[in-house]
Structures are given as structure tokens and as C-alpha cells.
Image (cartoon, helix red, strand yellow):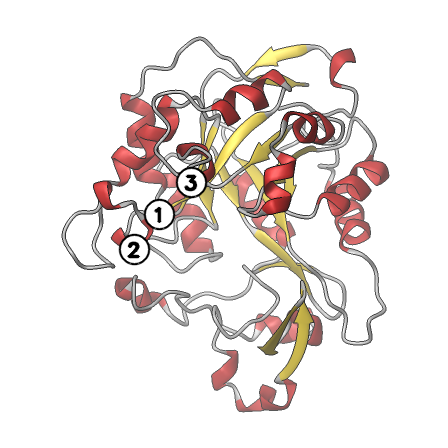
């Protein structure tokens, strides 16, 4: 990946191999966004860990999948916070629950993490209540602490929506830019890579941090706007502010007629031609998330052929696997014969 808005003027290097990215840690085995989940992802061989970032009432960046807290914490069972339950429009959809923007960091610290998908991952519920809510700074420090001279753990930060109760407050771009500067990681060679579905947010962050700011990845939805983004003109546009794209595994694996891609992915080839790396999201090992030919048994919570899933994507030339089970992706990478590098990274 690159770290500039002028790709043609930057020196080009190449990724030595695809990377494994622990999606919220290793949530196939531990509740997401916990110290245990991130540590396990690194133990399993992940090159990067991926936290989602939302905002507290006092403007602190904390890690949760969404700003509504009831899916991943015990807030619904905390009587002292019963009056905080409210409804709010988040990215065009009305959501009812408890929102991070209504809690100070100190209040969020009192909440305990729980398994977000207990039906599919019942064993993870044994860890409910053991871990608290982390800040982005703490996740970056965890990655620094776990890094060694021969192995740096990077952090792929996904920026989520911020919805202030009053409708007035600092933007996510402002908060993130200030925090990355404070932590000394607001540069291209640093351990932090920023991604978002919101192109405007990435552009704003690029303007604030400059062409030598952190590397960025444009997440791509499975919708009409995502279709526009992955067209050749769309990819060229993305390359003016980001260094990679992150489409869904289905968008990489299936063609326009929703048929399996026969050995070659036009999307991967076109992204590489635009000097963009490709990270595929999100690999999950349970049958509920796998295509029929990779399912094993009939139980939705049963573990299917996650190894085969990862290998299919690697054979299509992706540069990174965003996965809930890093061990499967690491195993696939070890079995995969890496061809001559095709994706470029600008330093």
C-alpha cells in the first residue's frame, strides 16, 4: 500500500506476501474487541489487528463494532444506565439502544464485554464479563508491546459513524487526526492503517494529515455505490487518497452474474493496475457464513472449510485476509504458493 495522494510520483515497493488481519482480534474464539481477542490473534500469527472505532461523550476514541452498546456489552443489564436508552438515526437507520456518545470514558470503563453472536459462538460466552472496553490508544499500545525486532504488529483501524446527542461536536476526522498525532503514528511508515466505508471521511483525514500521513484503505460495500467504486474510474479516484481497497469476499470471489470466479479476479487485477492493494472481508469459519460447497455438516454454528475459503481468495491474488479466525488464514498462507508480487506499496 501507498501513503500519498500522488501515486505516480512515489517510489514503488512490493508486498513480500499477503497479510493476515485479525478482525476485531480473533472473535471466533474470544469476544471481539477484548484484550484476550487481540492477544490471541497475534498468538495465532496475525500480521495486523483490526479494531472498529467509535467515540465517547468526552471525545475519546474507543473500540466497538458500532456506537450502540447492547450487542457487545452488559449495558442492558445495568440499572444505573437504564435512562440512557434512546433512539437515534445512525447512517440513515433509526436504532434504539445505548450509545457510546452518551457515556463518558469513565462510565464506559464500568461496562463488561460479552459475546456478540452467542448462538453461533456459544463457547465464547464463557468469557462474558471478564474484559472491559478498550480505547484505540490501548490497542495501539498492545500492538507495540507485542511487536518484536523481527515482527511488527500493525493496527488496521476502521472508523465508524459518530452521532452526537446534540447534533454538534467534533468530526471523526478531527478526533482521529488529533489522536494519531498525539500517539506519534500519523505518518506513512507508522504501524497504523486507517480504513472506512465513508470516502468523505478518508478524504478529510487525508487533507488533515497530508500526503505523507498514515496509509488508508477504502472499504467497499456490496451495493450500487460499491459497484461505482470498483469501476476503473472509481479505482483511479480512490488511488488519489488511499493505498488499498477492502471489498467483501463475495465481491472478490463472484463475478457480475454471482458465479464463482474461475481462477482470475478482474477486480483484483484492476485494483493492482491502479496501484491499490486488496484486502478481502470478512472470513468467518462457521457454516452460517460460508458458501454451500465449503460447509461441513448442517449446523450453522459448525466449523466449515475455512482453510479452503482462505485459499480461494489467496489464489485470486488478494493482498490481505480480514478474518475472525487468524489461525485458518495463517495455515492457508503457509500452504499457498505466493506468485511474483503484483500489488504495489508506496512508502
Q: Earlier in the sequence, mark 1 or mark 3?
A: 3
- Identify the residue at horizontal 33%, vertical 51% (top origin): 289
- Identify the residue at horizontal 50%, vertical 42% (top origin): 49
Distance CA(mark 1)–CA(mark 3): 12 Å
Query: Callout 1: helix, strand or loop?
Result: loop
- Within 10 angstroms of label 2, few (less than 14), some, or many (20 or more) residues? some
The residue that mark 3 highlights is: 250
In the image, 176 versus 291, the foreground residue is 291
Q: Quadrant of the N terminus?
A: top right
The residue that mark 2 highlights is: 288
Contact (Cβ within 8 Å) of mark 2 with mark 1: yes
Q: Position of residue 288 (x, y in %)?
A: 29, 55
Q: Quadrant of the C terminus?
A: top right
Q: Position of residue 17 (x, y in %)?
A: 45, 19
Distance CA(mark 3)–CA(mark 2): 14 Å
Single out the mark in the foreground, 3 or 2: 3
Single out the mark in the foreground, 1 or 3: 3
Q: Position of residue 146 (x, y in %)?
A: 49, 38
Query: Callout 2: helix, strand or loop?
Result: helix
- Within 10 angstroms of label 3, few (less than 14), some, or many (20 or more) residues? some
Query: Callout 3: helix, strand or loop?
Result: helix
In the image, 230 versus 192, the foreground residue is 230
The residue that mark 1 highlights is: 284
Q: Vertical placement of 272 versus 116: above or below? A: above
Q: Position of residue 213 (x, y in %)?
A: 76, 31
Name which quarter of the figure residue 194 lies in.
Answer: top right
Total marks placed: 3
Q: In the displayed structure, does residue 135 sit left or right of residue 26? A: right
Single out the mark in the foreground, 2 or 1: 2
In the image, 325 versus 144, the foreground residue is 325
Amino acid at each position: 500500500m501507498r501513503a500519498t495522494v500522488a501515486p505516480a510520483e512515489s517510489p514503488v515497493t512490493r508486498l513480500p506476501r499477503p497479510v493476515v488481519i485479525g478482525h476485531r482480534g480473533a472473535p471466533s474464539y474470544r469476544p471481539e474487541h477484548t484484550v484476550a481477542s487481540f492477544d490471541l490473534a497475534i498468538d495465532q500469527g496475525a500480521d495486523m489487528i483490526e479494531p472498529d472505532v467509535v467515540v465517547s461523550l468526552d471525545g475519546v476514541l474507543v473500540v466497538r463494532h458500532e456506537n450502540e452498546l447492547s450487542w457487545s456489552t452488559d449495558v442492558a443489564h445495568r440499572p444505573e444506565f437504564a435512562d440512557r436508552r434512546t433512539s437515534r438515526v445512525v447512517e440513515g437507520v433509526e436504532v434504539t439502544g445505548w450509545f457510546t456518545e452518551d457515556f463518558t470514558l469513565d462510565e464506559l470503563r464500568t461496562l463488561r464485554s460479552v459475546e456478540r453472536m452467542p448462538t453461533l459462538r456459544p463457547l465464547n460466552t464463557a468469557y462474558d464479563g471478564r474484559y472491559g472496553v478498550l480505547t484505540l490508544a490501548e490497542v495501539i499500545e498492545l500492538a507495540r508491546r507485542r511487536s518484536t525486532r523481527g515482527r511488527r504488529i500493525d493496527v488496521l483501524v476502521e472508523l465508524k459513524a459518530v452521532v452526537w446527542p446534540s447534533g454538534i461536536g467534533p468530526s471523526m476526522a478531527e478526533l482521529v487526526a488529533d489522536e494519531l498525532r498525539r500517539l506519534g503514528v500519523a505518518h506513512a511508515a507508522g504501524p497504523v492503517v486507517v480504513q472506512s466505508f465513508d470516502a468523505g471521511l478518508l478524504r478529510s483525514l487525508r487533507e488533515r494529515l497530508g500526503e505523507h500521513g498514515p496509509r488508508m484503505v477504502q472499504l467497499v460495500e456490496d451495493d450500487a455505490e460499491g459497484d461505482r467504486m470498483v469501476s476503473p474510474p472509481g479505482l483511479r479516484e480512490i488511488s488519489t487518497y488511499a493505498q488499498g481497497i477492502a471489498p467483501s469476499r463475495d465481491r472478490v470471489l463472484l463475478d457480475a452474474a454471482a458465479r464463482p470466479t474461475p481462477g482470475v479476479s478482474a477486480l483484483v487485477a484492476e485494483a493492482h493496475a491502479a496501484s491499490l492493494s486488496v484486502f478481502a472481508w470478512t472470513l468467518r469459519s462457521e457454516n452460517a457464513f460460508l458458501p454451500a460447497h465449503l460447509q461441513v455438516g448442517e449446523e450453522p454454528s459448525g466449523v466449515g472449510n475455512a482453510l479452503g475459503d482462505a485459499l480461494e481468495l489467496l489464489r485470486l491474488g488478494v493482498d490481505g485476509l480480514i478474518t475472525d479466525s487468524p489461525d485458518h488464514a495463517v495455515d492457508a498462507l503457509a500452504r499457498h504458493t505466493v506468485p511474483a508480487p503484483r500489488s504495489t506499496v508506496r512508502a
